[in-house]
Image (spheres, grey):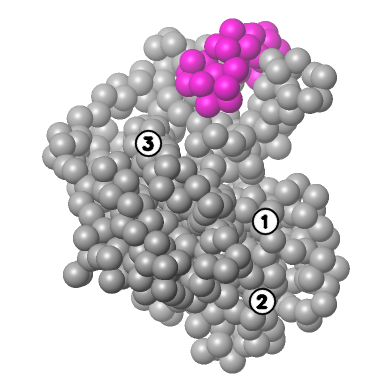
């Protein structure tokens, strides 16, 4: 009988930021980064590292560079080579556990693998609507294995009400994953499992309002169906901070007297900018000066195509940043699984709000996800999906280049959507309306603006569209734009 897995199987990803202009050899930078992560506790004893080939591919370096770095750290005693060919953070991990971790590697997702994504949207030929993940690719077989493990190994007395933070196994597995891949400084005691970001932000806003917060700042533009509505309902003032090409304009922060700021720093929603390191540091300084809280919505960080990884802001200031993650973009929105890493002084209140909201998320689903993460299945699923989404994104960019070369795509390096800015003189609302007449559903950036004016832009959600549907959608848009220009 197996026990629930909380050790990680061979990992697929690891956050390492390389500076190719630093004049420091790349293998030394990799060594230094892993060493620092181990020392800071981001990589736990026993955590497995990605195979050298996988990490090398992810970083865009030759395998020899990674091998050299690993060998050096093995020589220093930070890492240990394991039978089965992978490398772990050195500890006295029992050989049986290491062997079991390797045996979890085989996956067969026959139910999902043949499904083709559909183009839909009632009455539309093609729908570029955002917010849909390709659930036809849900890793059913691997998930089923984890469900089976949970149902055959978990004692009855675990299937009861629990502490508002969630099951310890999942909180630990999430910390291992987030500290390794997102550079967070997360401790299982500070994690609160919730029903997606939607519930997480709701709990946070309730707690902040109860603690006396009066005003909350949001990116302008930003999503219009969660934080904004919830904050207004809780009686908070909502102020927009304009967003530039590199994310939120930090120079505008000091002008508003806010107690909290909701941010999407890794891939601004919807415009796609990445908040640069200096701006992140400035936001943190702002939060420290004011005693404010930054809510980091890391909604789609797992999908990164041709840019270096950017770590989560939470790792810079765990006492001022709430990190929010979700399975909605990676597995399925219908799972309703999300997680927060909460500053120590807020954890008890947020956990209490969670209990009051629904008495806790499903124990069985949480244990299943913990097992799934521990087997390395989450990493494997992401590795399988990245090229799928990347091909769709490439098809979109290619079609835009061909049919609409004067639209300016932005934020293309990550996520499941692209914004394309319209040239001056082309009215966004007119284009959206003409597209609908041509059978194409697409949203403009305008409806997500709070107060700041800006250029017209269109949001292309491409996650569930096959390459030919994407090309067809862009051709429909080109016809619609010809109509607008002709009239
Ligand atoms: C900006 C943003 N954050 C988070 C989410 C995820 O929300 P949830 O986890 O509640 O499904 C979405 C969903 O589309 C989103 O657009």
| Residue plotted at (57% across, 22% down) | 60
Residues drawn in magenta:
51-79
Q: Position of residue 402 (x, y in %)?
A: 42, 42
Earlier residue among tags 1 and 3: 1
Between residue 238 and residue 371, name the one nearer to us: 238
Find out whether residue 153 is within the magenta segment. no
Between residue 210 and residue 270, name the one nearer to us: 270
Find out whether residue 53 is within the magenta segment. yes
Report if the CB atoms under discs 3 and 2 are less than 8 Å apart: no
Q: For mark 2, what is the residue?
A: 452
Ligand 1 is within 8 Å of the C-beta of the residue at disc 1:
no
Crowd around label 3: few <14 · some 14–19 · many ≥20 (10 Å): some
Q: Is mark 2 on a helix, strand or loop?
A: loop
Q: What element carries label 1?
A: loop
Up-down: is 18 above or below 263? above
Report if the CB atoms under discs 1 and 3 are less than 8 Å apart: no
Q: Where is residue 179 in the image (x, y as percent from the top left)?
A: 58, 41
Q: For mark 1, what is the residue?
A: 245
- Please identify the quadrant where the N terminus is shown: top left
Q: Which numbered dot is residue 391?
A: 3
Crowd around label 1: few <14 · some 14–19 · many ≥20 (10 Å): some
């Amino acid at each position: 009988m197996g026990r629930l897995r909380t050790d990680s199987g061979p990992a697929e990803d690891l956050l390492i930021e390389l500076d190719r202009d630093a004049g420091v050899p790349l293998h030394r930078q990799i060594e230094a980064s892993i060493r620092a992560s181990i020392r800071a506790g981001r990589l736990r004893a026993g955590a497995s590292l990605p195979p050298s080939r996988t990490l090398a591919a992810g970083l865009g370096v030759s395998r020899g560079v990674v091998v050299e770095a690993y060998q050096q750290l093995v020589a220093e005693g930070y890492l240990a080579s394991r039978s089965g060919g992978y490398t772990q953070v050195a500890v006295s991990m029992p050989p049986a556990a290491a062997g079991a971790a390797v045996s979890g590697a085989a996956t067969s997702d026959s139910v999902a693998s043949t499904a083709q994504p559909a183009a839909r949207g009632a009455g539309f030929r093609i729908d570029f609507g955002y917010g849909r993940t390709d659930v036809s690719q849900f890793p059913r077989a691997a998930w089923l294995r984890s469900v089976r493990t949970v149902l055959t190994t978990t004692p009855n007395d675990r299937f009861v009400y629990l502490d508002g933070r969630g099951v310890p196994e999942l909180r630990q597995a999430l910390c291992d994953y987030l500290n390794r891949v997102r550079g967070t400084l997360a401790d299982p005691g500070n994690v609160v499992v919730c029903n997606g970001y939607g519930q997480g932000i709701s709990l946070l806003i309730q707690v902040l309002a109860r603690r006396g917060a009066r005003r909350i700042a949001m990116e302008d533009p930003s999503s219009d169906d969660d934080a904004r509505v919830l904050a207004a309902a809780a009686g908070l003032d909502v102020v927009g901070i304009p967003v530039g090409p590199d994310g939120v304009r930090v120079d505008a922060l000091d002008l508003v007297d806010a107690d909290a700021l909701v941010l999407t720093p890794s891939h601004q929603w919807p415009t796609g900018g990445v908040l640069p390191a200096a701006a992140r540091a400035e936001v943190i300084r702002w939060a420290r000066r004011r005693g404010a809280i930054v809510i980091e919505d890391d909604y789609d960080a797992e999908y990164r195509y041709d840019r270096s990884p950017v770590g989560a802001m939470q790792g810079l200031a765990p006492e001022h940043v709430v990190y929010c993650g979700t399975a909605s973009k990676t597995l399925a929105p219908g799972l309703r699984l999300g997680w927060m890493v909460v500053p120590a002084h807020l954890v008890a209140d947020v956990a209490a709000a969670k209990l009051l909201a629904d008495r806790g998320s499903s124990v069985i689903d949480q244990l299943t996800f913990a097992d799934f993460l521990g087997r390395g299945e989450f990493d494997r699923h992401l590795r399988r999906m990245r090229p799928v989404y990347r091909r769709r994104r490439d098809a979109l960019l290619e079609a835009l280049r061909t049919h609409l070369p004067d639209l300016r795509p932005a934020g293309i390096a990550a996520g499941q959507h692209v914004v394309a800015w319209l040239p001056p003189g082309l009215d966004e609302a007119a284009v959206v309306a003409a597209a609908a007449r041509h059978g194409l559903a697409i949203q403009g950036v305008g409806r997500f603006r709070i107060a700041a004016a800006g250029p017209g832009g269109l949001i292309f959600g491409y996650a569930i569209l096959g390459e030919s549907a994407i090309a067809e959608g862009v051709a429909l848009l080109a016809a619609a734009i010809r109509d607008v220009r002709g009239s």
